[in-house]
Image (tube, rainbow, N blue to C red):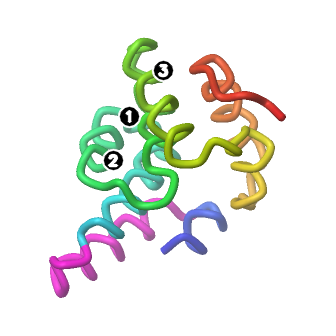
Amino acid sequence: MMVLLQAGRPDEALKWADKVAARDPALGWFYNHRRGWAYLVLDRFAEAADALTQTDFNDAHLLLAIACMRLGRLADARVEVGKMIKINPAITVQVWRQGYSFQDPAILDRYSLDLVQSGLPEK
């Protein structure tokens, strides 16, 4: 699913996430993370926020912060960044970006700015 997102095919990634989640609902924590990413890439921020509130997997708090920023909810975004910093005090935008590689680099550029504005240190 993540490969599809990174290759610029978020609609297809979302379909796969839904299909696989229907087969194994116990892994919803994982699929909601991927759904959240797909919705972010598709600029469907309310749906991203909904999916991401249903998981604590990996960097879900940062992704939720991005969705909140895009929805104009700065205070909520800052809370989510604070949660992530408590989990991983060494997290920075630079470290976060190293975990992803998108065909369209503007995706990470755009969302990195949201994270900085939400209080995540750049370096």
For the residues marked 3 and 1, what is the alpha-carbon distance in whole angstroms? 16 Å
The answer to whether 90 is drawn above or below residue 103 in the figure is: above
Quadrant the C terminus occupies: top right
Residue 92 image point, x, y percent: 72, 39
Residue bearing mark 3? 78
- 22 horizontally vs 119: left or right: left
Q: Residue 21 lies in what quarter of the image?
A: bottom left
Quick one: SS at disc 3?
Answer: helix
Q: What stretch of residues is rendered in magenta?
A: 9-27
Determine the main secondary structure of the stretch shown in magenta.
helix
Q: Residue at x 52, y 47 (%)?
A: 41
Instruction: Give the amino acid type for the residue marked by disc 2 in the picture.
Output: Leu
Residue bearing mark 1? 45
* Label 3, residues with CA under 10 Å away: few <14, some 14-19, many ≥20: many
Quick one: SS at disc 1?
Answer: helix
Residue bearing mark 2? 52
The answer to whether 121 is drawn above or below residue 24 in the figure is: above
Q: Nearer the viewer, mark 2 or mark 3?
A: 3
Residue at the outermost bottom position:
23
Q: Residue 38 lies in what quarter of the image?
A: bottom left
